[in-house]
Every structure is written in structure tokens, then in C-alpha cells.
Amino acid sequence: MPGPKDLDPSSSPRALLGAELRHAREKSGLSQEALGQRLFVSGSFIGQLEAGTRRLQTDMASKVDELLNTDGFFERNCTAADKSRYPNHFTEAVEAESMAQTIRQYVPSLIPGLLQTRAYAQAVFRAYQPTASDDEIENLVEARLSRARLIADPTPPLLWWVLDEAALRRVVGSPRTMAENLHRIAALIRGHRIIAQVLPFRVGTIGALGGGIKLMTFTDAPPLAYLDGIGIGQLIDDPATVARCELSYDLLRASALSPQESLALIESAAEDYAHEAEQP
């Protein structure tokens, strides 16, 4: 019987690999738990691979090929799928993001990537990589803007952000850049595309202020948390750790302004920047 055909990397390779993994596992008569034991991972992790919410790494793919007798299929296609425009530590999180049912996020200091305008993203990347070429910066910006297309999708995930007041007050790029980006966020809120709350300075010290949190839920897989820093990130599926991250986010959200108060503050800050940009 002929083996499975190699996958086209342009057609959601992670989801297709997951479907092929499920088929090969069931053909071998193994449960998710049994395959997980042989790969030294949990059965739920195998389920996430099959659902397409986790990426099958090349080193594990070769072991899968050996265990399921798939003649190098998974290793070959993982190598093709690894051609990502995102940093290695972020690729899996971006892929999970595209399949999420809900995304909740808190980012300290800056406007979150999915909400950034082109000018804002350019300023952020230039600040992080001052010696990069213009082409390198533009590639990074295009990758970031391509992620934001999920907001415009007719059936987007539920998107809920807690924005630190620092993101509103810190000038990134120029006052004109800030006005443009904050007006865009306000328009998304008024258009019922996103929910946003602002965590005001007056709250003082509160848990999770030291780093960003992104929480993602799925229709057919356990929730994930993504924690990030400068040039690093970690996608977490451990239920206890995810639950702790969810509690941290809930505490931030409870301390933030209401959505109505937050919108008023965002629009006020946008108008202040627009006025400043008009000054000679």
C-alpha cells in the first residue's frame, strides 16, 4: 500500500501533519497515551499535535517515523514546515494563535503586536535592532502585520487585551504614530472587533507586571499560555501553570478600568497626540 504523500507547506502543514499523525497512530493501533509514553510526552500532548495546536518538532518527527513505520514522512514534512518567517521561539505560538477560539493578552509597556500599525511596528523593530538593514526591518514588519489579519476575519477569535497605561503614554515613533495607532485601537473597540481595558498607573504594584501573558483556548484542545520577553518566549501546556497564568491575567483584568472608561482614555490620549503632531 502506498504511503502518504508529502505535504504542501503552503496549505496549513501543521494541521495536515496532525491529521496524518492521527491516521498513522490509529493504523498502528496505539492510543494517544501509548504513543506519548514511547515518545516520553503526555497523551494530551499527542492530542495537541493531532489537533494542530502544537508543532511537531523535527527530532520528535524522526522518532514518530520509526515508531509508526511511516518511512521518513514526518521528518521530511517537518523540515519543510520549519521554513517560518518568525523567530524559532515564536513560531509555534503564532501557529496556535491562528487556530485559537479565544486570545487574551497583557503586554507591559508597548501596544501588543496584533494591534500595532505599520509605523508603530517599524519604530519598535528599529529600536530593538538599530543596526538591521531596512529590508530586514520591513520583513519583520510584514510578518507582524500578516498576523493581524485574523482581526479582520469575519469569524475571528474572541480578542481581549489588557493594555498597560504605559503603552498609551510612552511615545513610540512620534506623536503622529501614537495618534494613528490609538485611533485604530479605538475604532476596533467601537466596531466590536476587540475588547480592551487599560491598567492605570494608579493601581501600583500587581502580579504579572514583569512580563507579557498570552492565553489561548481552542475548541478541541487544552488551553495554552505563552510567556515572552526580549528575544525569548515559552509556550506552556502544563495545566497547573496555565491555570496560574489565567489567574494572573484575571487579577490584571479585575484591576483595570472598565471597557467604557478604557475607551475614553484611549481616545483622549489619541487626541492629545494628534494635537501635538499638528504643532509646528
Image (tube, rainbow, N blue to C red):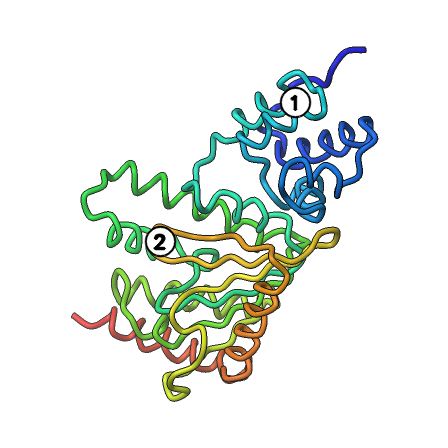
Which residue is disc 2 drawn over? Answer: 121
Describe the element under mark 1 as helix, strand or loop.
Answer: helix
Which residue is drawn at the image coordinates 25% and 74% (left, top)?
A: 276
Q: Is residue 279 left or right of residue 9?
A: left
Q: Is residue 154 above or below residue 132?
A: below
Q: Callout 2 environment at 10 Å: few (<14), some (14 to 19), or many (20+)?
A: many
Quick one: 41 or 46, which is closer to the camera?
Answer: 41
Quick one: 94 or 210, which is closer to the camera?
Answer: 210
Quick one: 234 or 117, which is closer to the camera?
Answer: 234
Type of residue at label 2? Ala
The picture quadrant where one finds residue 119 is bottom left
Which residue is drawn at the image coordinates 55% and 59% (left, top)?
A: 225
Q: Is residue 153 left or right of residue 139?
A: right
Quadrant containing the C terminus is bottom left
Tell me where residue 185 appears, x and y as whole percent: 47, 66
The picture quadrant where one finds residue 247 is bottom right
Which residue is disc 1 drawn over? Answer: 66
